[in-house]
Amino acid sequence: MRRTVDNAPFDAYAFFMKSTNPILYAGDTSLRTAGTYLAGILAHAGLAFEYLPSDQPIAPALRCGSRPLYIISDYPVKNWTDPDFQAVAAAVSDGAGLLMIGGWESFHGLEGEYHNSPLAEILPVTMEDHDDRVQSRRPWLIQAVESHPILKGLPFQTPPTVGGFNRISPKPGATELLRATAMEISDSPEEGLQMTSGASESLLVIGTFGKGRTAALACDVAPHWVGTLVDWGQPRVQAQAPNAEAVEVGCHYAEFFTRLVKWTMGEI
């Protein structure tokens, strides 16, 4: 990433794209760090959003009324109150979307502990009740297991990899779209360097709650867990949200996250 703005503070609740009903994107630390990736993709796709850093409570942003989509990505559960959870649950039941993206403070994670929150009922996955982080020095290959508009036309015959994720499992009635498969590497004098498939885990699961759509992506949207997914596809896409760093990513990465967001909010 290259820095393009100064270090002046910014309003956490500013509408970076003017809209009366923008997406609420909470987490990924800040727009000067991991948050710059998804924020850049949202801006590149022309999707109106409001960004909330990981160190800010969610309550003030919820006072603006229901949103078409709530994105929770590496956002601490301690920033919520029971009324906050109730407000989001009601909004999703009435037709809003909810997308959780993986990280140390997502699902259970290291400190996420969303398994004890009302979001555990809304999301289409069952969470672990203990540390669910899978971190590997070897790549995990992303494999499509179901046809769906989110994945249509994306070249999974040349799949990217991820470096880590939260361990989740689909609930009954949910749809698993992507899995991550561990690539085991061995080297022997007889056969030389060999790569074989190992364990396989759920990576992307979608579902519904009331009238709303829900999605759980177990990997991260930004380094380091995002792995080679961030560079998936040519040509390269340059993207930048206001008050954020500029990023350069693969075109298939940009298309995948754009479709994931649009599907969850009911636009495709």
Image (cartoon, rainbow, N blue to C red):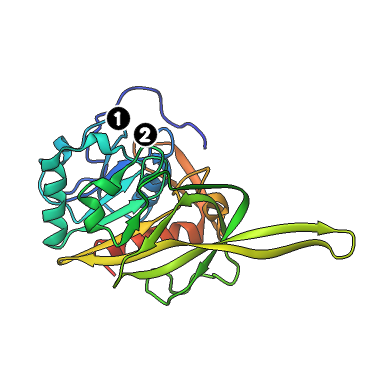
From the viewer's perspective, is residue 15 above or below residue 101? above
Secondary structure, mark 2, is: loop
Res 198 quadrant in image: bottom right
Name the quarter where the C terminus is drawn: bottom left
Q: Are marks 1 and 2 in contact (CB under 8 Å)?
A: yes
The dot on residue 198 is none
Q: Pointer 2: what residue?
A: 30
Q: Nearer the viewer, mark 1 or mark 2?
A: 1
Residue at left offset 51%, top offset 43%: 223
Q: Pointer 1: what residue?
A: 55
**From the viewer's perspective, is 148 left or right of 93?**
right
Q: CA distance from mark 1 to mark 2?
A: 9 Å
Residue 2: x percent and y percent? 51, 34
Residue at left offset 37%, top offset 34%: 29
> Which residue is farthest bottom?
147
Residue at left offset 38%, top offset 74%: 148
Residue 93: x percent and y percent? 13, 61
